[in-house]
Image (cartoon, helix red, strand yellow):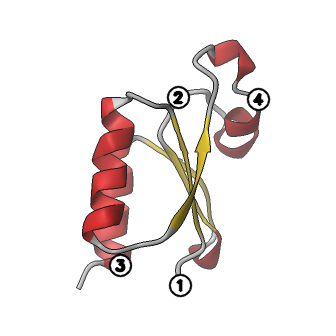
Amino acid sequence: MANLTLYELEGCPYCAKVTNKLAELGLEYDSIMVPRSHSERTEVKEVSGQTGVPVLVDEEHDVEGMPESDDIVAYLEETYGN
């Protein structure tokens, strides 16, 4: 199965767009909920260089921290869509 990790924030509409796509494609992933405060988001900043979410990590395809929900959705469709 895919080795995906999604950094997200509860109630984030951009994150929901990505989780909906993951569900639609039937992909399993690890969810890491980030703190509400941007100043406390050290883990996601280390991965992606910024504090915004969602951020996708796909170790299987050497994706180390892809930001932007539209980019992530397009990547998921291209990589895992049928």
Q: Which residue is label 1 attached to?
A: 1
Q: Which residue is label 3 attached to?
A: 80
Rendered location of residue 19, percent (x, y): 36, 52
Judge left or right: residue 58 versus residue 11. Answer: right
Of badges 2 and 1, the one in the foreground is 1
Report the amino acid beneath label 1: Met
Q: Which residue is label 4 attached to?
A: 42
Q: Residue at x 53, y 78 (%)?
A: 2
User: Disc 2 versus disc 1: distance between alpha carbons?
Assistant: 27 Å
Q: Which structural element holds mark 4?
A: helix
Check residue 26 in the rendering and tell me which mark sits there, or answer none.
Answer: none
Of badges 1 and 3, the one in the foreground is 1
- Asked if disc 2 and disc 4 are in contact, CB closer than 8 Å, the reply is no
Q: Which structural element holds mark 1?
A: loop
Report the amino acid beneath label 2: Gly
Report the amino acid beneath label 3: Tyr
Q: Nearer the viewer, residue 47 or 21?
A: 21
Q: Residue at x 70, y 45 (%)?
A: 47
The tag earlier along the polypeptide, 3 or 4, is: 4
Q: Is residue 4 above or below residue 81?
A: above
User: Disc 4 versus disc 1: distance between alpha carbons?
Assistant: 28 Å
Q: Is residue 55 above or below residue 62?
A: above
- Asked if disc 3 and disc 4 are in contact, CB closer than 8 Å, the reply is no
User: Disc 1 versus disc 3: distance between alpha carbons?
Assistant: 11 Å
- Asked if disc 4 and disc 1 are in contact, CB closer than 8 Å, the reply is no
Check residue 52 in the rendering and tell me which mark sits there, or answer none.
Answer: 2
Q: Residue at x 28, y 59 (%)?
A: 21
- Asked if disc 1 and disc 3 are in contact, CB closer than 8 Å, the reply is no
User: Disc 2 versus disc 4: distance between alpha carbons?
Assistant: 11 Å
Judge left or right: residue 8 versus residue 65. Answer: left
